Amino acid sequence: MPSSLSHLGDRVRKHFGDSLSPDDAYLSYHDVRVTKLDVDSIKYDWLTDNAIAFWEEYLEREELSQFPRAQIVLLRPSMSFMLMSTPDPLTLKEALPNFLHTTHIFLPINDNRDVSQAEGGSHWSLLLVSIIDGVSFHYDSLSPSNYNEAAATSAKLEVLLGRKLRFIHMEDSPQQENGSDCGVFVCLLMKHLLLKRLLRADASKKISMSMKEQDVNAAEGRKIMMRVIDARRKEGERRRSRSASPFRHSHSKSKSPPRIGEENESLKS
């Protein structure tokens, strides 16, 4: 390869984060710090807890926020795991959101049973709890791998909420074709169920929670997630560029990642 092309390739790779180490920040988005490891998992591998947490943060900030009357909670993976693993869920009342007026809860379910192991487990599934209907719907892309974990989490929620929940394992949930797409399925199903079934449904009619006819393209889903991340990374870079001090040396480079958050709203032009 000509040296000029080689240098160009190096600059492109550096611009898109390939020079970062796994723990380096790729994007700070409100309450989530997305690392290079998280980005790599979205591109090629089994999704990290933090990758799913970012997707939930994105849905809350940019989709759910458009429906201010909605009382829907997207529980983070760490909180879902804590709920499943804690013997007495009532001890978590201070740590978990207040569900008093909540109508639905989305919970990413992980099969990790070792409370001492962070980022453990080998499979993700999705639990959607309709508090107003008293039903827990479980969507597992490698059915029935996480049946026990999902049922146990639903039972813990019963105690926490003080009401019975009928647990339904969705046998017709779309199935993945490999061993690494489960987290992507969770993110795509969560978005579809939230936007197409709950937020835009006719409140006067019962809606089907079956995903039988829903086509889930995990490869395209990974690309969609990366487009969301890269668009906000570029926006963060533009904001930093506009706010740069005129006295800063032209060759200086900030070590901090691009940020998107409420603290930057005043920088919008």
Image (spheres, rainbow, N blue to C red):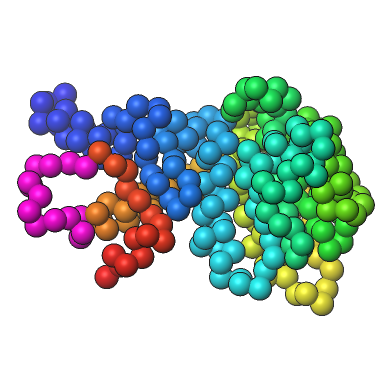
Tell me: 258 left or right of 121. Answer: left
Please tell me whether residue 245 belongs to the stretch shown in magenta: yes
What residue do we see at 77% from left, 42% from top? 91
Q: Going by the picture, which residue comes out furthest to the bottom?
A: 204
Up/down of 225 relative to 193, above or below = above
Residue 15 visible in the shown view: yes
**Residue toward you, 36 or 264:** 264
Among the 4 quarters of the image, the one containing residue 66: bottom right
Residue 246 in the image: state x and y as whole percent. 9, 57
The quarter of the picture where the C terminus appears is: bottom left
**Residue toward you, 254 or 93:** 93
Residue 237 in the image: state x and y as whole percent. 27, 51
Please tell me whether residue 97 belongs to the stretch shown in magenta: no
Residue 191 in the image: state x and y as whole percent. 62, 55
Residue 170 visible in the shown view: no
Residue 102 in the image: state x and y as whole percent. 74, 62
Up/down of 64 relative to 108, above or below = below
Among the 4 quarters of the image, the one containing residue 76: top right
Tell me: 153 left or right of 177. Answer: right
Up/down of 194 relative to 28, above or below = below
What residue do we see at 16% from left, 24% from top? 1
Q: How many marks?
A: 0
Magenta residues (range): 241-254
What residue do we see at 54% from left, 48% from top? 55
What residue do we see at 87% from left, 48% from top? 158
Q: Main secondary structure of the magenta part?
A: loop
